[in-house]
Image: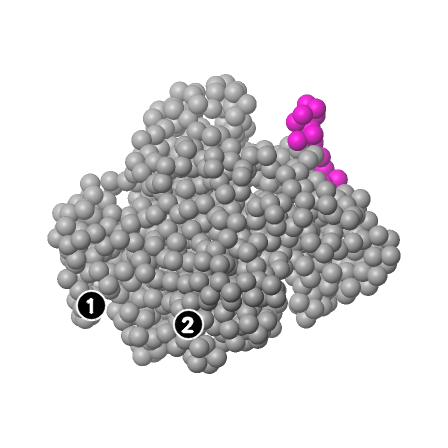
Amino acid sequence: MTSIARSALPLSGVRVIDFGQYIAGPAVAMILGDLGATVVHVDPPSGPLWDNPANAILNRNKLIVNLDLKTEEGVEQAKALVAEADIVVENFRPGVLARLGIDFAALRKARPELITLSIPGFASDDELRRDWRAFETVIAASSGVFTDMGRNRVLMGINPSFSPLPLSSAYGTMLAASATVLALQARERTGHGDHIEVPLASAVMEGLSYNSILIDDYPVRYQTQREREIERRRREGLAMDMSYEDLQEFLDPFYRSYMCADGRMFYVVCPSHKNHAKRCLQTLGLYDELVAEGLREEEDTYLPVSQWSSDVSLGVYPLPKFWADKIAARMKEVFLTKTAAEWERIFGDGLFPGAPQRWLKEWIADDHARAAGLMIQVDDPVLGRMTQPGPMAWLQESAEAMLMPRPRRWGTAKDALAMLADMERPSLPVPATDAPGGWLDGVRVLDLCNVIAGPHSVAYLARFGAQVIKIDPAKPLYDCWNTVIFGMSHMRGKQSVLLNIGSPDGRVVFEELVRSVDVVVWNATDRQVKTMGLDAESLKTLNPKVIFCQLDCFGGVRTGPRTDYLGYDDLVQSATGIMLRFGGSMETPEEHAHVGTIDVMCGFGAALGIATALYQKSRTGIAGRPRTSLSALTGLAQIPFCYDYAGRGPFDEPSGRETKGYDALSRLYETSSGDHLLLCASETDLPRFDKVEGMRGILEMAGSDREAHLARVFMTASAETWRQRLHEADIGVSICENIETIRSRSARIADGTPGIDRGSYSFSIFPNHPSGHTVTQLDPFAIRTTVGKVTAVAPAEKYGASTRTVLKSLNHSEAEIERLIACGTVSETWSAEYLPS
């Protein structure tokens, strides 16, 4: 790639110093480098603290220098580099870098335009945990990631359950990267930089926000068969001992895997949508016979179920057990008639979601992944020709330059300083003396999205001051489980408008809205975007200044054979190896337990793209087209093992439901109190164990003997006792918490604050929620700023509540609004009840 091509990237000219180690810090700087920033990465003299081939990915587009920050010379060299930077990144424990002589507060006092980013494991104001050795698995265990990890694992009695996906680092990376660029674009307007803290524990809680919400008096219609079985067993004191095979019969027929003719499983994800399940059954040749047997499609599924004409409605999740069993039995027979690859084409061309189960190794070499730029080739100086994940987010007008990143390279501090000093410093306004407000104050966003990833990206922007109008159809396309329950999280801080865009009058209103905003966001395929008239050429005539952000399932920088296939979070898990890793075999795939595993990450990716486009627009006047996809983010979610090269070891990383961890020093252990501990240590930590009562002597033991010995030892005392002993020796450890406990001890009555001053965990209770239910949900608290304002966004209003208000703002009269309502162009509600019972 030529320097001219790289100079076209949106962050060209931005200078970054990366002190990060492990994943999150280096990954943020990698993303900034992918987008065009000039990045200097600082390693200690002995090299990176994490010895993993993934460092070749994390340090692409970077010049690496080795500095000893424990010496006066090393600190002075580091300070000289920082003096040339726009952005400085670190992810040590709170206060570590300052003690080494790189004090962000002092640096920003001298240079208020500087943006500094800290990504600690736990929040700096978390008195209990801030000084823990906060490795990835320690944060996961402390944050409830491993406990109650999916209803399958609970019913099988595998609780807690281990996963090797670095979710804390992945969510933290995308939150921190998006926040950094949001601060960068705000600096263009205010002249102020900022100090940003993103605790990884808080980041993973935001990533799992759809799993931690509590709705009092939750209507029984939304409970799945598995949820009801868990409640029944707990109520009757029965063991959680179901087999994997028995559990499959508790799954919805449109939300499960089926064996195909070639012995490969195929995952169907067609629940909740008005058309997908019907298209699926019609294509399988089952629809007419099931209708003849009594399968119904209710005209209005937003009525209370007591008012339905039947006990079932196709396209509503979950289906009653009688119909779920009947439909699944027929579908099993049909899927055995074709190969998984054949079904993939049939589902993709038929416009309903499904994908084969693939291993990660297969995804890395997949024809679509390679063609679309979701996997790219990099000539690493150490590992040679290497397949790496492609860009996480990009602007379409310059994205081609991101497919050929520069491999990591090494140099001296003098080399790095010369490179940075030679760059032109940005011209910025004089910092205003009054409070700058939110990073997105005055920015208007039109949200056309559905399900989770798209609408979550826009909800995230609202906390920084963005004004958001959310459009949904006048008549719902998804069932109320998908819209209302998920919407309680992603509709916060938004005005809701119900509009039939496809009608002539609706199109007029839609175009008025597009002309009135700065950003439009839609999760849709290229085919859908063009049909809607939001492709680049059409949008230029409508609003040439608007930024259009697109998310989809399989999209990449380039068009691949499956770019226009539909899909959701679970589907991309199956396509990229996550479900087989979690389940352990082709015969036992399992969805990664948490709702929104990739969705929320992708939402933060879209926010990063929007922030980048806003920065580019402020610098050049060009209204770019940011883009990301679920598939693009799976590379980050699997980054410790998402690569290939000649000589790579076997793809034998931890997988399957029996996995407890990596080895004897890094795994789950049961204690005498019945609680489980997550131990996270390495061979270099072995001398520390000699300081721990009951742990002496493991240095001389071999792996299997060591594991058996530790298992016996941990059963001699309670989890809390072992936690204290190991922390005193500075060994990574955490008790496996569950989300319910974290929520109950971290919740307060909503007080209008975003929770950023409440440690690593913070929830608000809304006793007067617009739904009529008491709702407890996570605060918007993972991004902690020093300058920019973070707002406690309002609870989600009822769908359609702002239809009339928004139309009035567009100068529609009351009479005109009434006409639009009467003819079905707009609506003020989908249902009498906020959450249909």
- Residue 261 occupies which quadrant of the picture? bottom right
Where is residue 141? Give x, y as percent. 47, 36
Left or right: where 275 falls relative to 832 = right
Question: Which is in the foreground here, disc 2 or disc 1?
Answer: 2
* Crowd rating for badge 1 (residues with CA inside 10 Å; few <14, some 14–19, many 20+): few
**Cβ–Cβ below 8 Å for labels 2 and 1?**
no
Identified by mark 1, the residue type is Pro
Name the foreground residue: 775 vs 811: 811
Q: Residue at x 57, y 62 (%)?
A: 821
Q: Which residue is mark 1?
A: 426
Based on the picture, tell me whether residue 482 belongs to the magenta stretch.
no
Task: Give whichever of 341, 378 is nearer the camera.
Answer: 341
| Disc 2 from disc 1: Cα separation | 31 Å
What number is the disc on residue 406? none
Ranked by sequence position, the earlier of labels 2 and 1 is 1
Identified at 67% across, 63% down, the residue is 352
Q: Is residue 636 left or right of residue 48?
A: right
Say which quadrant the N terminus sits in.
bottom left
Front position in the image: 521 or 302: 302
Residue holding disc 2: 515
